[in-house]
Amino acid sequence: MKEIKTTQALGKLIRETRKSQGLTQEQLANILGTGRRFVLDLEAGKESCHLNKALKVLTMLGLELYLRQKGE
């Protein structure tokens, strides 16, 4: 399990996972029904990306998001 504390770290994980699955940004955008610009911004760690769309990307790539309380 990776600890993600920044939007940049989340973007890096998404980019690495997308590439490991042999997908281009364009292909991922088409699958998600979004524009390539959204995927580009998400992978760059842009803080204004829509959370709902980001969660959709994680799910599509087979990633899960878990939250825990600090100190657990």
Image (spheres, rainbow, N blue to C red):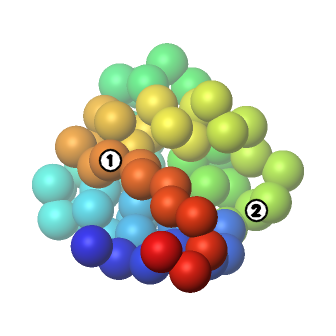
15 left or right, relative to 45: left
Residue drawn at the location 27% of the way across and 73% of the way down:
1
Q: Is residue 22 above or below residue 62?
A: below
Q: Give the secondary structure at mark 1.
A: loop
Using the image as rendered, state which of residue 61 and residue 70 is in the foreground.
70
Residue drawn at the location 62% of the way across and 30% of the way down:
52
Instruction: Residue 19: name its quadrant.
Output: bottom left
Q: Give the secondary structure at mark 2.
A: loop
Residue 46, labelled with which disc? 2
Q: Which residue is mark 1?
A: 64
Tell me where residue 40 appears, x and y as whole percent: 60, 55
Residue 36, labelled with which disc? none
Q: Residue flagged by tag 2: what amino acid is it?
A: Lys
Determine the residue located farthest toward the left in the rendered image: 21
* Whether residue 29 can be seen here: no
Determine the residue located farthest toward the top in the rendered image: 33
Work out how far the residue at label 2 is from the one at label 1, CA to CA, in angstroms: 20 Å
Using the image as rendered, state which of residue 54 and residue 71 is in the foreground.
71
Q: Residue flagged by tag 1: what amino acid is it?
A: Glu
